[in-house]
Image (spheres, rainbow, N blue to C red):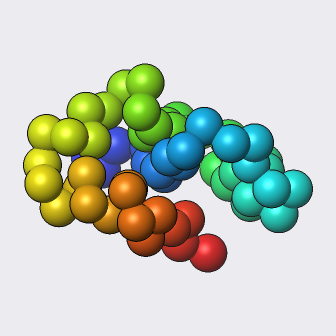
Amino acid sequence: MIPKKIHYVWFGGSEKPPETVAFIRGWRSLMPDHEVIEWNESNINVSSHPLHATDVQRRQVRLCQ
C-alpha cells in the first residue's frame, strides 16, 4: 500500500503567504486521511548535500503549486 503522506518543503523560517497556507489547508481538507509533513531547517540538514545547500542559499527551492 502507498503511504498516505504529503511532503512539502519550507525553508527560510519566514511566515507562509496566505495562498500557501490555503494550499496546505486544502490538502488537509481534501485528504483528511493523509499525513502532511513539512520539511524545513529544523528537521533536515540542508548542508548534508552540496546541491541542497546551494539551492537554499540562492533561494531557488520553491513550493510546487
Residue drawn at 50 percent across, 46 percent down = 11
6, 32: nearer the viewer: 6
Q: Position of residue 64 (x, y in %)?
A: 53, 72
Quadrant housing residue 34: top right
Give the mark count. 0
Residue furthest to the front in view is: 57
Q: Can see residue 19?
A: yes
- Residue shown at the point (40%, 66%) measured from the top left: 58
In the figure, residue 19 lies in which quadrant?
bottom right
Instruction: In the rendered view, tell whether residue 51 sits above or below residue 42.
Output: below
Where is the C terminus found, in terms of image quarters? bottom right
Give the answer, above or below, for where 11 lies relative to 35. below
As drawn, the residue found furthest toward the bottom would be 65
From the top left corner, tell me how far across and down residue 16 is, in percent: 74, 48
Q: Nearer the viewer, residue 63 or 11?
A: 11
Left or right of residue 52: residue 48? left
Question: Residue at 37% across / 26% down in the picture?
Answer: 43
* Residue with the most extreme left position: 49
In-image side of 1 versus 17 (left or right): left
Q: Is residue 28 left or right of residue 42?
A: right
| Residue furthest top in the image | 42
Residue 2 picture location, percent across and down = 30, 50
- At horizontal 26% and vertical 60% (from top left) the residue drawn is 54
Say if residue 29 shows up in the picture.
no
Horizontal side of 50 relative to 11 (left or right) equals left
Q: Percent x, y for residue 57? A: 37, 56
